[in-house]
Amino acid sequence: MSEVAVERLSNDKAFKVIFVLGGPGSGKGTQCAKIAKHYGFTHLSVGDLLRAEINSGSNNGTMIESMINEGKIVPSEVTIKLLQRAMRESGNDKFLIDGFPRNEENRASFENLEKIEPEFVLFFDCPEEEMERRILNRNQGRDDDNMETIRKRFKVFIESTLPVIEFYNLKGKLYKIDACKPADEVFEDVKAIFSRFRAKNITLLQFSLSII
Ligand code: UDP
Ligand code: MG
């Protein structure tokens, strides 16, 4: 990764961003793949970007690897640089950002730097027992998919990520989805949310035109 200072990426481009949050194993990646295909977004999983960074042999690799294996949140100056690079390289202007922001520091840093507010935030809500079952049944070769790290990831999710979810809820930007169902059923609910969001925006646009 280049060592240049973190700079704003979105100076001359209007980016559309949707944040996708949920506990480990809630199905963020699965749903994002469907959404990206259906609606033309670029799916950026920050966990995947971090794993690719480790595999690329970067200087930060060892630090990132030990943080992931402890279920800890990597400093946002690292994750934001990776995100910016992936956004730039995609050439797209519509992004589904999966698994970020994970804490208040991530959220504030990204927003202050890029001056981007998400259009909305999807929250895949799933009970811990179900998430645990899914993680233990999948085999993605991830070192952090073991019981000890899973417990730590659940704890970090509750302590650090739920407050971010609540922040967006208070802003009226949160759409909570029951993620405990089969993937295709969950996706039906996701599609309903995209239609609702579109309808709401059209109504708002008509309203603002009618008061001019
Ligand atoms: N991670 C991080 N910051 C991010 C996203 C991920 O530090 O913005 C780290 C964190 O250690 C996390 C791991 O990467 O536990 C795996 O994240 P991912 O989203 O792939 O998995 P999840 O825990 O949501 O299944
Ligand atoms: Mg994932």
Image (cartoon, grey):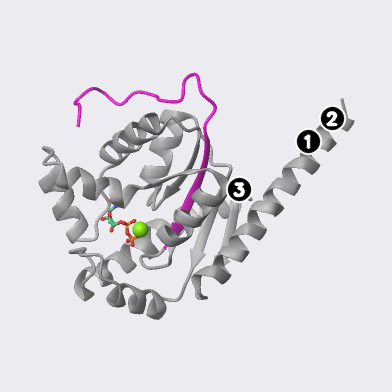
The residue at the point 22 percent across, 68 percent down is: 149
31 vs 106: above or below? below
Quick one: SS at disc 1? helix
- What's under tag 3, amino acid-wise? Lys
Q: Residue furthest front?
A: 37
Principal secondary structure, stretch drawn in magenta = loop
Badge nearest the viewer, 3 or 1: 1
Question: Which residues make up the magenta segment?
Answer: 1-22
- Residue 171 appears in view: yes
**Residue tagged 3:** 171
Label 3 vs 1, first from the N-terminus: 3
192 vs 45: above or below? below
**Residue tagged 1:** 205
Residue 88 x, y percent position in the rendering: 38, 29
Residue 86 x, y percent position in the rendering: 35, 36
- Foreground of the two, 101 or 52: 52
Q: Residues within 10 Å of mark 1 (few under 14, many from 20)?
A: few
Badge nearest the viewer, 3 or 2: 2
- Residue 178 appears in view: no
- Foreground of the two, 132 or 117: 132
The residue at the point 75 percent across, 48 percent down is: 199
- What's under tag 1, amino acid-wise? Leu
* Cβ at disc 1 under 8 Å from ligand 1: no
